[in-house]
Amino acid sequence: MSKSLQAIRGMNDILPEQTPLWRYFEGTVARLLDNYGYKQIRMPIVEFTELFKRSIGEVTDIVEKEMYTFEDRNGDSLTLRPEGTAACVRAVLEHGITGGGQVQKLWYIGPMFRHERPQKGRYRQFHQIGLEVFNLDGPDIDAELIIMTWRLWGELGIRDAVKLELNSLGTSESRGHYREALVEYLSAHHDKLDEDSQRRLKTNPLRVLDTKNADTQAVLVDAPKMADYLDDESRAHFEGLKARLDAVGIPYVLNPKLVRGLDYYSKTVFEWVTDKLGAQGTVCAGGRYDGLVEQMGGKPTAGVGFAMGIERLVLMLETLEQIPEEISRQVDVYLCAFGEEAELAGLALAERVRDQLPNLRLQVNAGAGSFKSQFKKADKSGALYALILGDDEMAQQVVGFKPLRGQGEQQSIAWDALAAHLATCVVQG
Ligand code: ATP
Ligand code: MG
């Protein structure tokens, strides 16, 4: 017997019973981003491998061990995108849409790929909504990104379950000074560091700060603090951000160990974290990357952005039972017809109703069936009302209108009056 076909581990189907919640989430975010003046951009899912090496950095977890890289038929090395910022920067440079200081406020949505160990909230194909702003260098825009996500948590009903962690990595100069001090301190304690941290000390020392190893964490307690190395510019930027968050009343926790996984951040970094999802607690993360565009061959261009993990946020909505009632019902009205003549009349009637009520979710029974079986399907569909067309109704040019949930007797409605009647009893989404 042949082996049954399976999806790749860590790459999930999103089944029909799950998609309403995904669409609700995605729709809520999209509407919010529209309202704040952000425009959607769509990039390819595959890019040259070089793009990610150059932007994310050679000595990051992503580039070292998480990328899906392959050679295509031309012999080019390609990679399934592990995140969106690199491709977004490539796209704005390629199309010249950030030239001359042009401001761009962009967002994107789609699958990302990382070869990680699959577990709850961590997958190999996962989905992000990401956002990037170019050519605005002040703390006001950093604040706007955070304020916008704060509003999103409010609309989704999960605001009490997330916490904002904030740090500043400073300008590249101040980070350089800090890195020196940190390397000097950690080198003096080299033997007490775990193996991974010893390696990072040479390649990417700031990453030692977010180690999970308890011994290394103990060494870090007395390590130099980034906050003491911020230059005036970085400090003013960070204060400006905090003042704006205070003005709107958004609580935050300063986390000096927050460094983020990617190489390209400067000044502001932040994460929204939750304790509701176990180990995979970060639902949205981002920061400023003023050096990245230049590093990728463009003119010096300020940049700031974030990405949120859709799987983790959908899981949160489920865990906290913040699933709006209306999304679980996908049918308003179910039309049952008995006999061929009624079926034909029913089809025409359904199209007339749809012309007049384009948002009505009207399902017409397919596959014929007895009165009992059609009624069962109507009920199972979740519809609020059944429409019935049988011999009697055909003779009188009416349709039987039967409430399926709660009170009310069946009534007869004239075909011509049906749309108007439905408009009064179904709230259309
Ligand atoms: P983590 O520390 O959890 O590995 P990260 O720092 O690697 O996250 P980012 O690159 O900042 O993650 O991606 C932004 C967001 O995308 C994360 O906060 C998370 O919500 C989501 N995310 C990242 N990797 C995965 C994954 N493998 N599966 C599901 N969601 C993910
Ligand atoms: Mg990661």
Image (cartoon, rainbow, N blue to C red):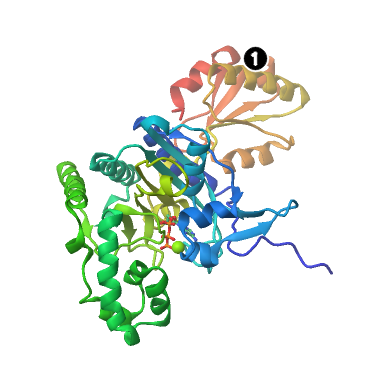
Residue 10's image quarter?
bottom right
Can residue 367 be seen at all in this image of the molecule? yes
- Ligand 1 in which quarter: bottom left
- How many dots with numbers? 1
Q: Farthest top residue?
A: 416
Q: Mark 1: few, some, or many residues within 10 Å (few <14, many ≥20)?
A: some
Q: Position of residue 298 (x, y in %)?
A: 45, 41
Q: Quadrant of the N terminus?
A: bottom right
- Judge by depth and name the residue closer to the eye, 223 or 147: 223
Q: Position of residue 260 (x, y in %)?
A: 36, 60
Q: Is residue 414 left or right of 1 when viewed as pictured?
A: left
Q: Is residue 240 left or right of 50 when viewed as pictured?
A: left
Q: Amino acid at mark 1?
A: Gln
Q: Secondary structure at mark 1?
A: loop
| Residue behind label 1 places its C-beta within 8 angstroms of ligand 1 | no
- Which residue corresponds to the image point at 37% horizontal and 41% vertical from the top-left? 301
- Which residue corresponds to the image point at 17% horizontal and 63% vertical from the top-left? 228
Looking at the picture, does residue 205 appear above or below residue 195? above
- Judge by depth and name the residue closer to the eye, 245 or 374: 245
Can residue 165 be seen at all in this image of the molecule? no
Q: Position of residue 52 (x, y in %)?
A: 52, 54
- Judge by depth and name the residue closer to the eye, 410 or 85: 85
Residue at which label 1 appears: 397
Looking at the picture, does residue 96 appear above or below residue 419? below
Q: Is residue 261 left or right of 126 when viewed as pictured?
A: left
Q: Farthest right residue?
A: 1
- Which residue corresponds to the image point at 21% horizontal and 59% vertical from the top-left? 253
Q: Position of residue 89 (x, y in %)?
A: 47, 43
